[in-house]
Structures are given as C-alpha cells and as structure tokens.
Image: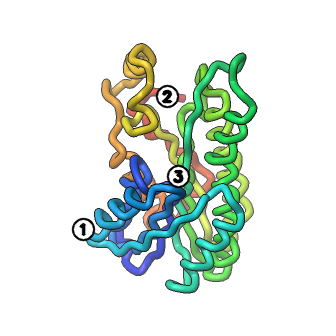
Amino acid sequence: MDFTGKIAIVTGASRGIGRAIAVRLGSLGATVIVNHRSSQAGAEETAAAVREAGGQALVVQADASNADDVKRMVKEVLDVYGRVDVLVNNAGTTRDMLILRLKEEDWDHVITTNLKSAFLCTQAVTKPMMKQRYGRIVNISSVAGLSGNAGQANYASAKAGLVGLTKSVARELGSRGVTCNAVAPGLVMTALTQDLPADLLDQARQLIVLGRPGEPEEIANAVAFLASDEASYITGQILSVDGGMMMM
C-alpha cells in the first residue's frame, strides 16, 4: 500500500486507535491531518510519531461535532494542500450506564460525539472528493453497534448509526469514485476501555476466539487497507476486527 501524496484527515487522533491510524497512514507515505478537540499535547505527540514513521503531519484543533469547527478544519486543509483524499471518522467517547439510569445529556453527548461528528466531517469533504472524483471515507464503528451491549445503549446506538451512515454515503458517492466503509473493532485496550470493570473485561475475553484483546495497530491496519487503492472495489462494507468475538 502506498499513500505517497495522499492527504488524510483522522479525527480524534491524539491517542488510542486514532493515533495508531494516523501513524500507520504516515508510515505508508500519507500527509496526516491530526485532529483533536482539546488535547494539543497528545496531538503533537501523534504528529511526532507520524513524522518518525516517515509521513508528514499537520495538527488541527477542531471539535468534530461542531459544524463551524469542521468547516474551518477542512478549509484549512484545502487551503494548504488543495485536496482531501482520506477521511477517517474516529472521534468518539463513552458514558456508560444502564438505560434505566442513563441521563439525557449523556445520551446526547455520546450520539453527538460519535455519530454527528462523522456526519459533519463527511458532509464537509463530500464536495472536494466528488470534484476530484476520488476519496476514501472510513468510519470507526464497533461490535457494540452490531450486537448491542448492556450498559451502552447510547454508544451502541451511535455506532449502529455509523453503519447506516456508511451504507448511505457509499450509495450516494460511489458514482464519483468515493468509497465509504467502516471498521468495527472488538475489545481493544485503549484509554476508553482500560477502566472497564474487571468482570466485564473477563466476559468479553471469553467471547474472543483468538483469546486476547486487540491492539490499536491491528485496527489501524484494517483502516489503512480500506483507505488504500487496493480496496478500490470495496464500498458500503462493515469489517469486524474483533478476534472472532462476534461471528455472524
């Protein structure tokens, strides 16, 4: 896979899976826009790792769930580079609670951060990608969006929404050479999962055929493939990268 000359935006890239995706794309030659909402230091660390891997990086602060911020970010990228080739909608968060006790603001926050952000960013890159008749959009969903998960009604709903968004965008933009796919990670040890209760982690591990949690780099490898020219005839697909956790 070769991303030389490609411009890739990765939202929520200051840590975890987003950082791994940015570094992997950079290692393949991409210029990576390292987006973050509030972690400048983390984003700069990601950018340094991208450069160390052989790519180029530009840090851009923007709240991916805010329309004005997203428009500003994409305009900056277009002003500097003149194109956007890859968009990875990775920004996300959790506020877990059983639905009986789930607060409306926690529902809204998770839906906005995980789903609305992908809509806004996708909408913002649609015109330039259609104009250049080339684009790769990869959404980071979750196995929770495919099967549901107790205590994560907000998160699972947002990630399921990304499945519908992925397929709709694939149908709308396919004739212009733009593909849209999603990766659905299983249990991956990041800052979002390390504080999960031990009993819940044990239950999850028992479902994983490969017997271990995934690494962020393993998710990044799948994203890089779907964002590459090698995946030019793949669109509207949801690729589970979960160690066999949710076979369907």
Q: Is residue 48 left or right of residue 91?
A: left
Q: Which amino acid, mark 1?
A: Glu
Mark 1 or 2: the one toward you: 1
- Residue 46, image x and y in percent? 35, 60
Mark carried by residue 90: 3
Q: Is residue 209 left or right of residue 126?
A: left
Query: Is mark 2 in CB contact (under 8 Å) with mark 3?
Result: no
Identify the secondary structure beneath mark 2: loop
Q: Looking at the image, can residue 238 be seen? A: yes
Residue position marked by numbered label 1 in the rendering: 52
Q: Which amino acid, mark 3?
A: Asn
Residue at 53% x, 73% y is 85
- Residue 92, image x and y in percent? 55, 46
Quadrant of the rendered structure where residue 44 is? Answer: bottom left
Mark carried by residue 247: 2
Residue at 64% x, 40% y is 110
